[in-house]
Amino acid sequence: LPFPSHATSKIVSEEEWENVLYPLLSDIYTGALFVKNPKSRRVIVLEPYVAPTAFRVAVCRVLLARLGAANVLFVPGGGLSAVPYGLGSGGKEGDANVGGNKIVVNVGTWECRVVGCAGTNCLMDTVQVVPCGFDSLVQYIMIEHNESQNNKNEEESTNKIPTFEDAKYVVTKCLHHLMPLSSSIFKDNQEEEITIPLQSTTTSSPTVQITISLQLIKQCIHDLYFDIQNPDSLVYAFCSALLSCPIDLRKRMAQNVVMVGGGVCAIPGLEKTFGKALTRLFKRKETMDSKFAPLTTVILKGEGEQMGRGLGIIYPLPFAPHLLSFVGGCIMSTLDLTEERWISKRSFEEQDGKSQNSDTKSVIYDFLH
């Protein structure tokens, strides 16, 4: 689940989280995985960087108390995203010469999350969350396109995209038409348009033709991902996260940028385009926010050889971006780590019982912190 999101932002208590998570985890645990003996299974939870403690409590209650799992281990999803690259191991946190220092850019469904990581540890002061996931892009394009049809005649007004699912189909087709995105996004196509047939759900009009401007598509992509003046854009979040990193770690982190999430799969060439856009922004100083000026030498200069020498985006990816965290979790589960903190069913129920019998929730919160 994303944090925060339009769907979950009003959930604050363990009970509310439990009501949301139980049907979901129960279906996955028993319906999809067909776990016959829950007591024989240990569960690793790839935790979002900004998940509230109430979320942890609810996950433990569902998995340990209600579904009967043996043990649960919470690990930071962002840090583990880099493990398959070999960037998540070795050295001590804070060591500027350790390859484990990186920035993880997670392009999700509705949000993008950026965080600096030392090894598998997320630096919480660097976390940035902005509403520019892939579905946010689709919604933005749909609104902009439909509004552009309002002032046209009746025949042209039928060119509006009818549903959100239709919009996702149209945007996906347009993105493939724009490949390679890293070069086409910076070119002015004037009023070049593309016509995409949609299968209508109504019998009176079995096929709908949607004609959409490629320039509008590119402008929306620019606004959400590459506009440094927009505080809700991906580049703004990235620069803010990098600026929040300790000065001695910035150079190494900028050289190890890991882009993960389903949005990276949905937008072909996003990694290369993101690196090219950042390099162009810092070369054109007049377009930059002055507070990001200290990052100029980090982005444009350094030991790296790709993406403007200083900035290093890991590409091509050894695994699909939306699977990287799961691969990292699988690797983590096979390691004999001395600092693992597995939460057993028995220990959780003991602490949860003490918390429910006291006036405050601090007992269980301190246990899971």
Image (cartoon, rainbow, N blue to C red):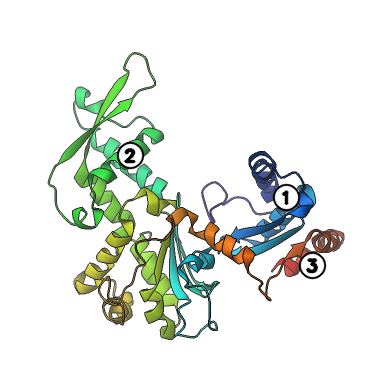
Say which quadrant the C terminus sits in: bottom right
In primary-sequence order, the first of circles 1 and 3 is 1
The image quadrant that residue 138 belongs to is: top left
Q: The residue under label 2 is which amino acid type?
A: Met
Picture coordinates of residue 176, whole percent (x, y): 27, 44
Q: Residue 275 carries which label?
A: none
Q: In this view, does 9 lie to the left or right of 201?
A: right
Q: The residue under label 1 is which amino acid type?
A: Glu
Picture coordinates of residue 105, whole percent (x, y): 42, 63
Q: How far apart are marks 1 and 2 (CA)?
A: 36 Å
Mark 2 surroundings: few (<14), some (14-19) or many (≥20) residues within 10 A: many
* 262 over 118 or under it: above or below: above
Mark 3 lies on a secondary structure that is: helix
In primary-sequence order, the first of circles 1 and 2 is 1
Q: How far apart are marks 1 and 3 (CA)?
A: 17 Å
Q: The residue under label 3 is which amino acid type?
A: Val
The answer to whether residue 261 is visible is: no
Residue at x-position 49% and y-position 73%:
117
- From the image, tell me which residue sits under label 3: 363
Camera-side residue of 95 and 353: 95
- From the image, tell me which residue sits under label 2: 142
Mark 2 lies on a secondary structure that is: helix
The answer to whether residue 108 is visible is: yes
Residue at x-position 28% and y-position 72%:
306
- From the image, tell me which residue sits under label 1: 15
Picture coordinates of residue 119, whole percent (x, y): 52, 75
Picture coordinates of residue 136, whole percent (x, y): 40, 48
Camera-side residue of 309 and 248: 309
